[in-house]
Image (spheres, rainbow, N blue to C red):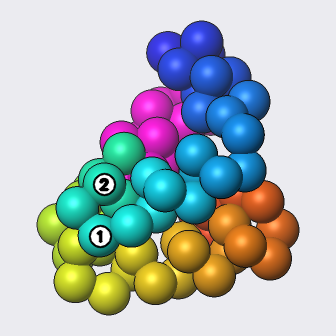
Amino acid sequence: MKSFVSAMDGLPWILKLILAFPGLDIVWGIYRIVKGLNKNDMVMVFAGIIWILVGWAIFWIIDIITVIVSGRPTVFA
């Protein structure tokens, strides 16, 4: 699981931005779940589950903005 997190962290900025588009944003939800499990952070796991369930509707906008500004998805990642 650590290799998945490292791989996602090492992606180029433009690919991170593309993965933040609606429909593809589920990848960032999975990333949050895996990263939360690695850190034993249940808040991040819960955020990942919520991101998968509701992210396609509105949270993808937050991911796009934060990837543009900081080069990585939101606080819960």
Q: Is residue 70 above or below residue 19?
A: below
| Amino acid beneath label 1 | Pro
Question: In terms of depth relative to the viewer, which is nearer, 55 or 43?
Answer: 55
Residue 62 x, y percent position in the rendering: 53, 82
Q: Is residue 27 above or below residue 54?
A: above
Residue 58 x, y percent position in the rendering: 32, 87
Boundaries of the magenta span: 28-42
Asked which secondary structure carries label 1, the reply is loop
Counting the numbered discs, the total is 2
Question: In terms of depth relative to the viewer, which is nearer, 64 or 55?
Answer: 64
Residue 75 x, y percent position in the rendering: 67, 68
Category of crowding for the residue at label 2, using alpha-carbon neighbours closer than 10 angstroms: few (below 14), some (14–19), many (at least 20): some
Residue located farthest toward the left when viewing the structure as drawn: 53
* Residue at x 56%, y 74% (from the top left corner): 64
Image quarter of residue 74 = bottom right
- The C terminus - image quarter: bottom right
Q: Report if residue 65 lies within the magenta region.
A: no
Q: Do residues under tags 1 and 2 come within 8 Å of each other at their CB atoms? A: yes
Q: Is residue 36 above or below residue 10?
A: below
* Mark 1 vs mark 2, CA separation in Å: 5 Å
Describe residue 12's horizontal placement relative to residue 32 as left or right.
right
Category of crowding for the residue at label 1, using alpha-carbon neighbours closer than 10 angstroms: few (below 14), some (14–19), many (at least 20): some
Q: Which mark is residue 22?
A: 1
Image quarter of residue 52 = bottom left
Asked which secondary structure carries label 2, the reply is loop
Prevailing secondary structure class for the magenta stretch in the rendered image: helix
Q: Which mark is residue 24?
A: 2
| Amino acid beneath label 2 | Leu
